[in-house]
Structure formats: C-alpha cells, structure tokens
Image (cartoon, rainbow, N blue to C red):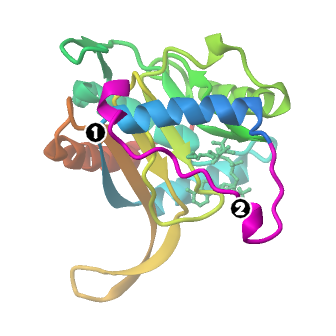
Amino acid sequence: MSDKFASMFPWPEEDFSKYGEVDVKKLGKVQHFVGKVMDRNWVSIPHVTHHDDIDITELEAKRKAWNAAHSEQKRSILPALIKASVEVLKVYPQFNCSLSADGTTVTQKKYYHIGVAVDVAGGLLVPVIRDCDSRSVDDISTDVADKSARARAAGLPMAEMSGGCFTITSLGHIGGTGFTPIINAPEVAILGVCKARPVFVPNEYSQPVARTLLPLSLSYDHRVINGADAARFMLAFKEAIDKFEFA
Ligand code: CAO
C-alpha cells in the first residue's frame, strides 16, 4: 500500500495558531485505532454505495402493536434489519464472503454473524451478534442491548467484535437521508440506515397516501460485488422486511 501512495504530496502541516486561537489535543486511543482501521479500509477497498428507500409503514405498525402489547420490553427496528440482512445474505451469498489480502481468493461463509456499529464515547465499536439465522428476535434484541450497553460502559473484548459477516450501522435515531458507510474489512458490504420519515406516495389512482420510508445506504466492495447485485440486494431486503414479524 505504501508504494501506491509514495508519490502523493505530503500531508499539509500547518501552524494554525498563525490564523487564530487553537487548542491541540491527542486523539483518544479508541478513536486513533478506529481511524487507522477506517483509513486502511477506505483506501484499499473500491467502495460503491447504493442508496434506496424502503417502505416500512407495515413494519412500523407491527412494531408499535408489539410494543403496546409488551410494556416491559421495547423493540426498535434493528432486529428486523438484522433478520432481513440474514435472509438476503442467504439469497445473495456474494455479500457473505471475504476476499484474501492478495485479492485472488474468496472465502464463502455459511454462518450469519452480523456486526452492529455502536456509538461510544470517543469512538465507534462493532459488536458481533452471532448466528442470527437460528436465533429468535427476542434473543437478538437482548444480545444487541447487552453488547451495546457494555460497549458504552467499558468497551468490549476483541472476541466479541470479530468474526462478523456483514455490518449494520444506524444513524436512524439521529437523522440523515443517506451516507457512505466504510466497509468493515474483511467483510465486503455494510448497510447504513438513516432516519425513517413520513411521506406522501401516489397510489395506483395517483392519490397521495401517507407512508413511512426508511433510507438505506449499502456500501459494497466492487471487486466482488457488482452494481446489479446491490440493486437486487435492496429489492430482496424490502421483501424480507415485508415478511418480518416481531414475535
Ligand atoms: N428511523 C427513525 N427512528 C429510529 C430509527 C430509524 N431508522 N432507528 C432507531 N430509531 C428510534 C428508535 O425507535 C428509538 O425511538 P423511541 O425511543 O422513541 O422508541 C430511538 O430512535 C433510539 O433508538 P436506539 O438507538 O436506542 O435503538 P436502535 O436499536 O435503533 O440502535 C444502536 C441501537 C446500538 C445501534 C444505536 O444506539 C447506536 O449506537 N447507533 C449509532 C451507530 C453509529 O454511530 N454509526 C455510525 C457509523 S459511521 O461513523
């Protein structure tokens, strides 16, 4: 990788205090580590990001009904996104593989471990939720809640952040209409989620109907996944979301 960048201009080092008051701090350890991983992944993987909106009106109705009937527990849409990802990885296994460092060999995974990006103080951690194909929605929800709480409180051991097949990174509780998530190598794709929004969509009689749309951004490694695969992934994802039940 170093040869590829040897002829680049050096990083512009500036004395910013020439221009105004500044404060200089060292990056935290987690942010520095995550930054190095992001840097490697961004410069070494040819990323393409496919954006689409999926209609989650029925999913939201099911989720609200489930939450109303289970006041002691609460479901977000995340377990639905995890389960739908697994369904689609089964249909399009090229999203569930890893490319060797020399780019010549693809390893096909036959297990379904899904990473979930968690925003922690001073960085970003990605706990891996294992065997999401065979576990219940309840079990997956509990595992996400447990791992994200522990990640925020004190970090997680590497063993709980390794072995992922595919990552979901959600900014949905904050906002946004789309972004370009960086692939979590050696995975080959990552799904970014933004904030669901109410919109009027024309029905078959061209009458406006209120629907809820969820913006999704799928970044993929163009060495192993083609644009048409990503478009098909999104269609299959919509179908999987339509079939999802919170129970
Ligand atoms: N659209 C609208 N609302 C959403 C939403 C979406 N896509 N996703 C979540 N929400 C809502 C939830 O329904 C919940 O609302 P209520 O409290 O009113 O029910 C609220 O946002 C908070 O959700 P949550 O964050 O507790 O739950 P989650 O299961 O959606 O996410 C977790 C869990 C751990 C993924 C999340 O807390 C988190 O850390 N996300 C950040 C990941 C990140 O930083 N990624 C960026 C990577 S690139 O640098």
Residue at 79% across / 47% down in the picture? 71
Identify residue for label 1. 46
Instruction: Locate the C terminus and report the quarter of the image it occupies.
Output: top right
- Image coordinates of residue 132 in percent, x first then y, are 49, 23
Local packing at callout 1 (Cα closer than 10 Å; few below 14, some 14-19, many 20+) is some
Q: Quadrant of residue 110?
A: top left
- Horizontal side of 38 relative to 103 (left or right) equals right
Amino acid on which disc 2 is placed: Phe
- Residue behind mark 2: 16
Residue drawn 16% across the image and 40% down it = 226
Does 219 appear above or below 141? below
Q: For residue 5: magenta? A: yes
Disc 2 secondary structure class: helix
- Residue 151: where, in percent of width, then height? 75, 29
Residue 173 sits in quarter? bottom right
Residue numbers of the magenta segment: 1-25
Question: Visible in this render: residue 52?
Answer: yes
Q: Is residue 189 visible?
A: no
Residue drawn at point x = 45 percent, y = 78 percent: 199
Question: Which element type, helix, strand or loop, lies under badge 1?
Answer: loop
Whole-angstrom CA distance, mark 2 to mark 1, is 33 Å
Q: Is residue 24 left or right of residue 225?
A: right
